[in-house]
């Protein structure tokens, strides 16, 4: 039963996390371009633009929230992992229990975040300072993405609950999902000329 629930959730969360991550990357490129234009006009042409600061800030907010589900799903948030790695190897069921508590706590935090975010959204009738858009468009992203991230947290809860009962198979394969966007040693070897690949020590890939 738990496996079926996790598979259903994973069918939705995995492609959704990839799409949101790509959108966040596009916004990062746009934000970088705006910052470059801002520096160019302010320090080179001595004609500062009024809209660049606010637009880059809004894009950063969107980028952060869009990438949050992918970060949560693949456990890429900043963390000290030396204790959790020991627990996962030595006492996997205890680790699963603590992970379940952590994910439930995260859901509670997300619910509170949605509540206050929605209250803040209702004050968004005012216009932005330098852009012709109401603040509704900015205030809406936190509660919406918190709601999406709850779906990801539920999937992690189901996986932790399975582990707690002794089922440790990685059904969601989140590690493989994260690896799709990371450069590995094998990828670097493929970029090398063929003769250099042949001359590499045999132990370099197995170290």
Image (cartoon, helix red, strand yellow):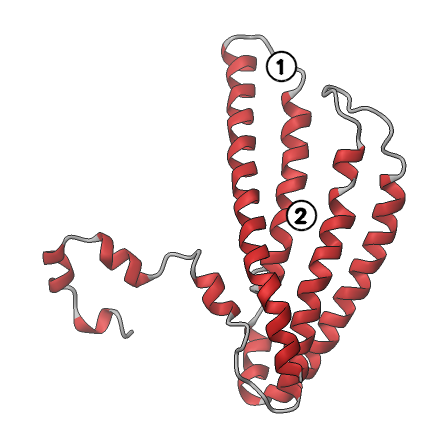
Mark 2 → mark 1, Cα distance in angstroms = 26 Å
- The image shows residue 138 at horizontal and vertical percentages of 75, 36
Looking at the rendering, in which quadrant would you find the N terminus? bottom right
- The image shows residue 62 at horizontal and vertical percentages of 66, 41
Residue 146 in which image quadrant: bottom right
Question: Is 168 on the left or on the right of 195, as rendered?
Answer: right
Asked whether the viewer can see residue 66, the reply is yes
Name the residue rendered at 59%, 83% in the picture: 87
Question: Is 207 on the left or on the right of 43, as rendered?
Answer: left
Residue 137 in which image quadrant: top right
- Mark identifier at residue 63: none
Asked whether the viewer can see residue 79, the reply is no
Instruction: Looking at the picture, tell me which residue is in the foreground, 73 or 76.
Output: 73
Disc 1 packing (10 Å; few <14; some 14–19; many ≥20): some
Asked if residue 195 is positioned above or below residue 49 in the image, the reply reads: below
Disc 2 packing (10 Å; few <14; some 14–19; many ≥20): many
Farthest residue, direction bottom? 166
What residue is disc 1 on? 49
The answer to whether mark 2 and mark 1 are in CB contact below 8 A is: no
Q: Earlier in the sequence, mark 2 or mark 1?
A: 1
SS of the residue under disc 2: helix
């Amino acid at each position: 039963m738990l496996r079926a629930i996790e598979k259903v959730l994973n069918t939705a969360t995995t492609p959704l996390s990839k799409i949101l991550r790509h959108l966040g990357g596009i916004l990062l490129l746009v934000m970088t371009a705006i910052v470059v234009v801002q520096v160019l006009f302010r320090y080179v042409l001595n004609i500062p633009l009024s809209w660049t600061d606010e637009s880059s800030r809004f894009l950063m907010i969107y980028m952060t929230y869009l990438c949050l589900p992918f970060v949560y799903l693949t456990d890429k948030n900043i963390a000290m992992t030396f204790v959790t790695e020991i627990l996962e190897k030595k006492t996997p069921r205890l680790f699963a229990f603590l992970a379940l508590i952590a994910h439930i706590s995260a859901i509670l935090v997300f619910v509170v975040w949605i509540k206050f975010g929605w209250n803040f959204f209702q004050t968004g009738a005012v216009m932005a300072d330098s852009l012709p858009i109401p603040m509704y468009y900015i205030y809406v992203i936190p509660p919406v993405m918190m709601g999406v991230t709850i779906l990801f947290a539920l999937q992690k809860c189901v996986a932790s609950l399975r582990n707690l009962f002794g089922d440790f198979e990685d059904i969601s394969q989140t590690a493989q999902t994260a690896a799709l966007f990371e450069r590995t040693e094998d990828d670097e070897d493929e970029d090398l000329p063929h003769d250099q690949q042949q001359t590499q020590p045999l132990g370099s890939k197995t170290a």
